[in-house]
Amino acid sequence: MTFQELGLIEPLTRALAAEGYTHPTPIQAQAIPLALKGHDILGTAQTGTGKTAAFTLPILQLMVAEKPAAGKRVVKTLILTPTRELAIQIGESISTYAANTSLRHAVIFGGVSQKAQTDALARGVDILVATPGRLLDLINQGFIHLKSVSFLVLDEADRMLDMGFIHDVKRIIQLVPKKRQTLFFSATMPPAIQTLADVMLQAPKSVEVSPVSSTAETIQQALFYVDKKNKKNLLQHLLENKEMDRVLVFTKTKHGANKVVQDLEKAHIKAEAIHGNKSQNARQNALSNFKNYKTRVLVATDIAARGIDVDDLAFVINYELPNVPETYVHRIGRTGRAGSKGKAISFCEEEERPFLKDIEKLIGLRLPVEENNPFPPVKEVPSSSEVKQQVKSQRSGGRGRSGKKPWRGGNGNANRPKRQS
């Protein structure tokens, strides 16, 4: 199937062809025809599946078909997204796809001066991409009115929940007309997000691809058991491989990201961190340097990394395992995109073994353990029964990952691959 076969107009297919895009991804093939018919969309799709085009292309086509109103341009499409990086990425996509149309768009987000953003709004825009906080701020100042919105997109809804933006989103929904077309996308569908979708959508059509529990077959996964104190040594050892010329490293905290960068810089390895405490300019510069191979290692927290989209990224390293197993799938999904091969390497210290257990349960396989490990843990890898007991203890409020009750070790079968049905 081609984009032309989806019913897209020539200005859009020409813009896509100029970028080398001819065939839609599964989420695009499902969502675009439904959106073109005016249906609300409830989409479940993780990052890297092409969902930005899935909601942008049909909206552009429907807007081109509308007769422009006389006078100053007003916001007809509002796209809400949780992070600055993702907002910028969506804005870049709109610039690409709408190149052969007369539609104007603007991107607004916090962390920078608002003047350039308010100047763009004053000139008039058809499509507005916004993070919730800055949007509400500019609405309160009188720079933005949403009474003419015909198309509303909520992207990365689950991340909105994680970042505490749901109340802001609900306030914004009250400001847009009830008669509208809404496209709602989320990588996961926890109860709070399902409730929000029920409020926002009218008789939606559901589209779903790449469930969050799946990892791309193009990604080679690997696991190193390592003591916490040796993680930095293991990372530097792996980076002795010159083929790892660009590596995205994940940590759980901002402080942890800064510490990894400091350790790498001491080892004369060019690295930069990207997280919420960095200014917008610093984050964009770090991402640009990484894309252009000026920075070899980009160290990111999960919230800051949600909008990172880097072509041909071959290596992702989980320096710290996430305590939410779905986050593991999102992290390693930064590599192995669009059919390219990638490798995801995870470090697991003693206190993170319950997290590993949850991850393996979610994805339905045991992560292959690297045999050539120069920094093996002092304690033996726990058996399956010990891991199960540790997880149970933590969930019941017992002693666990805070280090108050250590593993006893054992010669278990934790490394044995799970039989696949």
Image: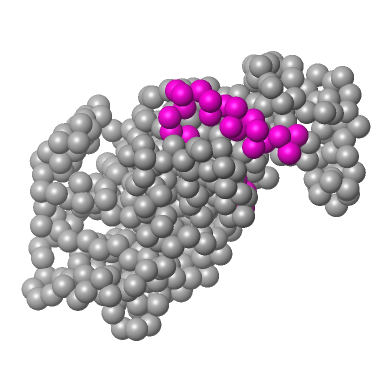
Q: Is residue 38 above or below residue 124?
A: above
What is the image's colouring? one colour
| Magenta-colored stretch includes residue 294 | no
Q: Position of residue 384 (x, y in %)?
A: 82, 26
Q: Position of residue 78 (x, y in %)?
A: 31, 63
Residue 418 as seen in the image, left or right of residue 158: right
Q: Is residue 38 above or below residue 44?
A: below
Q: Which residues are magenta?
A: 227-253
Measuring 88% from the left and 39% from the top, which residue is drawn there? 406
| Magenta-colored stretch includes residue 235 | yes
- Looking at the picture, tell me which residue is in the foreground, 300 or 130: 300
User: The N terminus is located in which quarter?
Assistant: top left
Q: Position of residue 334 (x, y in %)?
A: 46, 37
Residue 85 as seen in the image, left or right of residue 229: left
Residue 391 as seen in the image, left or right of residue 244: right
- Looking at the picture, tell me which residue is in the foreground, 248 or 202: 248
Measuring 28% from the left and 54% from the top, which residue is drawn there? 91
Measuring 37% from the left and 65% from the top, which residue is drawn there? 109
Residue 321, quarter of the rendered image: top right
Residue 380, quarter of the rendered image: top right
Residue 111, quarter of the rendered image: bottom left
Q: In this view of the protein, can residue 315 be seen by the observer?
A: yes
Q: Position of residue 107 (x, y in %)?
A: 30, 62
Q: In this view of the protein, can residue 190 be seen by the observer?
A: no
User: The C terminus is located in which quarter?
Assistant: top right
Measuring 26% from the left and 50% from the top, which residue is drawn there? 92
Q: Is residue 85 above or below residue 142?
A: above
How many callouts does the rendering have? Answer: 0
